Image (spheres, rainbow, N blue to C red):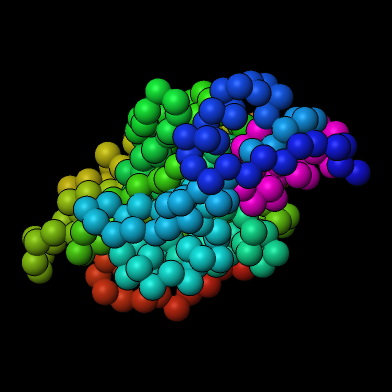
Amino acid sequence: MLRPFTLHRPETAEDACALLATLGEDAAPYAGGTELLLLMKLGLLRPPHLVDVKRIAGFGDIADGPSLTIGATVTHRTLERSPLVRARCPLVASVARHVANVRVRNVGTVGGNLAFADPHSDLATLFLTLDATVELVSPRGRRELSLAEFVRGPWETARRPDELLAAVRLSPWPAGTGAAYVKFGVHERPTLGIAVALRLDGAGERTRVADARVAIGCVSPRPMRAESAETRLNGVAAAELGDVTGVVADAAAESVDPADDLHGSAEYKREMVAVFARRALRVAAARARGVEPAARFPHAVVA
């Protein structure tokens, strides 16, 4: 049962930030509320004031440009259905379609998902491969951070008490990139999620991996890029990708920092990272060559 609280509904970012600055630790930003209200019902959070940011102009917009800008209050359902997102970052739309359940997707927001910093976030993991940055607004103005800098750990971000997350910006992959997101789990929150993007360059036998992105989420305290796996992929001939998949998957597994929890032991999670990294690599490599693989994996979602 929810304890009584005061709901504030500012219509500008300036007014919202002023409220947060004035109310301090007694206030929490409120968008979709899928995580926040649950914790309040459980009595784990008891803010006497909620600052509703859904009415703030621009926070619900998706805009094109050199980067794809997604406003903080854009819902997962809107992200899934947006023609602009499907055109510029189709994998983002596909992954949004598999976030939690339809009830959550209808009300849960992109900004709320990132600002809550739940370690089991599909979007945060995928966004790392798109060089995501977040825009924060406060009474002092605006600042931008990479998503890797913003998410510091489980439920911990670099957002200051008087700041709001206004938008996230993604850099769409260039032509010639094949990408995949594979997640596995028996609960609503995934046990692991792996995003892979491979950009091929050249022709015929000279085709090589010009850029590789590998991000792993849900097993470590925060989503992370597997730089050692990326290094092993860069420069590899397209024809030899199948030969290095095992080595790359092992490097990905070694890069994570898993912990024992309800989703499994650390050893189990590390092994699953190796297994599903191999699968994600095979799908991304096929797509980079212009082929849509027919294979599907039991108990896993492939986007």
Residue 163 locus on image (x, y percent)? 50, 29
Residue 176 locus on image (x, y percent)? 20, 64
Q: Is residue 155 left or right of residue 141?
A: right
- The residue lying at 10 percent from left, 69 percent from top is 204
Q: Exactly how many numbered labels are in the figure? A: 0
- The residue lying at 22 percent from left, 49 percent from top is 211
87 vs 31, nearest the viewer? 31
Region of the chain picked out in magenta, as a range: 28-44
Q: Quadrant of residue 76?
A: bottom right
125 vs 231, nearest the viewer? 125
- State whether residue 28 is above or below residue 32: above
Query: Is residue 237 covered in magenta?
Result: no
Residue 117 locus on image (x, y percent)? 57, 37
Query: Is residue 34 covered in magenta?
Result: yes
- The residue lying at 80 percent from left, 36 percent from top is 5
- The residue lying at 91 percent from left, 44 percent from top is 1
113 vs 54, nearest the viewer? 54
Residue 43 visible in rendering: yes
